[in-house]
Image (cartoon, grey):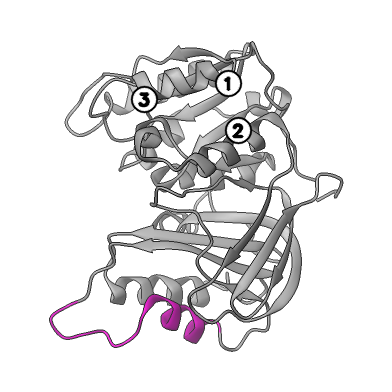
Amino acid sequence: MSITPPYLQKGDKVAITCPAKKLPGPMTDAVALLQSWGLEIILGETIGASYHQFAGDDDLRAKDMQRFIDDDSIKAIFAARGGYGTVRMIDKVDFSRLATNPKWLIGFSDITLLHTHIYRNYKLQTIHGQMPVNITDASASSLTSLKKALFGHEVTYHFDSHSPNRPGNAGGVVIGGNLSLLISALGSVSDPDYDGKILFIEDVGEYLYAVDRMMHTLKRAGKLKNLAGLIVGGFTDIKDNDIPFGQTVPQIIMEVVKDYNYPVCFDFPAGHIPNNHAIILGAYMQLRVMQQSANATYNKNTDV
């Protein structure tokens, strides 16, 4: 059974910390947005910190995360941005306080490692969604979806797919995030059990051959065989070599999972896109996939 952290209420304190790459500027827009939701914002020491490309050295970034995990007055922790660096500090953090004082963690991209780690070890729900650094470019609907997820309102999606789906119905806990980070977690204490789960994947800036390699790596590791379903989000800024790879991302994915029978849908509105809608990782989802569209609904009353 997964743990749902307490939903936010007006007046709650939330924290912004930066576990990976340093920020390009102040968090003015993000603070204003969260304040408009009735929240009190606490900024970590990593906001504005700099050590090479990181938001402070590994110890500072771990210390900042630890501070907000251990502070019971903080009801949610927003990762300010992704980039690279979470893997360098994650093992310096003691997450055990989340078992007795669960709180929401929000982020995507490099933050995928925190999502998988927290679910693997504590069965705690987290949110793959817009981060403070992305607020100025975020679509209104993506921000609304994040607020709904955090404040406990119903989260449902209907979306169209531009590539042919593999129709079917599925129910299961949603796991996943950035494909590259899922690969980096393999074999580690942050690597979750994929069996019976609905897997969500997205990525940015990769070569087509690298997407193919990563999908085959998941397959060879036995991660794709027993899924309940597969949701494919944005694969943006994908590159090719001088000698073309010869397949699109949807074609690569469908070839890798052709021997399995679970539903597969494309173009879920999440990933490195302005329309990055909130996905509650660790929560139970009902997924209905049609040929060119899909419906996704969370069931709060299902024990998982």
Q: Is residue 226 left or right of residue 78?
A: right
Number of residues whose C-alpha sits closer than 10 Å to that of mark 1, classed few (under 14), some (14–19) or many (20 or more): some
Q: Residue at x 20, y 26 (%)?
A: 51
Decide which of 249, 31 is in the foreground and name it: 31
- Residue 244, percent across and down? 21, 85
Kind of residue at badge 3: Arg
Kind of residue at badge 1: Trp
The part of the chain drawn in magenta is 241-257
Separation of marks 2 and 1 at Cα, in angstroms: 8 Å
Q: Residue at x 64, y 10 (%)?
A: 11
Q: Nearer the viewer, mark 3 or mark 1?
A: 1
Q: Disc 2 marks which residue? A: 147
Kind of residue at badge 2: Lys
* Quarter occupied by residue 149: top right
Separation of marks 3 and 2 at Cα, in angstroms: 26 Å
Q: Disc 1 marks which residue? A: 37
Decide which of 34, 18 is in the foreground and name it: 34
Compared with residue 4, is residue 116 higher up or lower down, i.e. above or below? below
- Kind of element beneath mark 2: helix
* Quarter occupied by residue 238: bottom left
Q: Disc 3 marks which residue? A: 61
Q: Is residue 108 left or right of residue 4?
A: left
Number of residues whose C-alpha sits closer than 10 Å to that of mark 3, classed few (under 14), some (14–19) or many (20 or more): many
- Kind of element beneath mark 1: loop
Compared with residue 183, is residue 207 higher up or lower down, i.e. above or below? below
Look at the numbered discs 2 and 1 and tell me whether their residues touch, using CB distance below 8 Å: yes
Separation of marks 3 and 1 at Cα, in angstroms: 27 Å
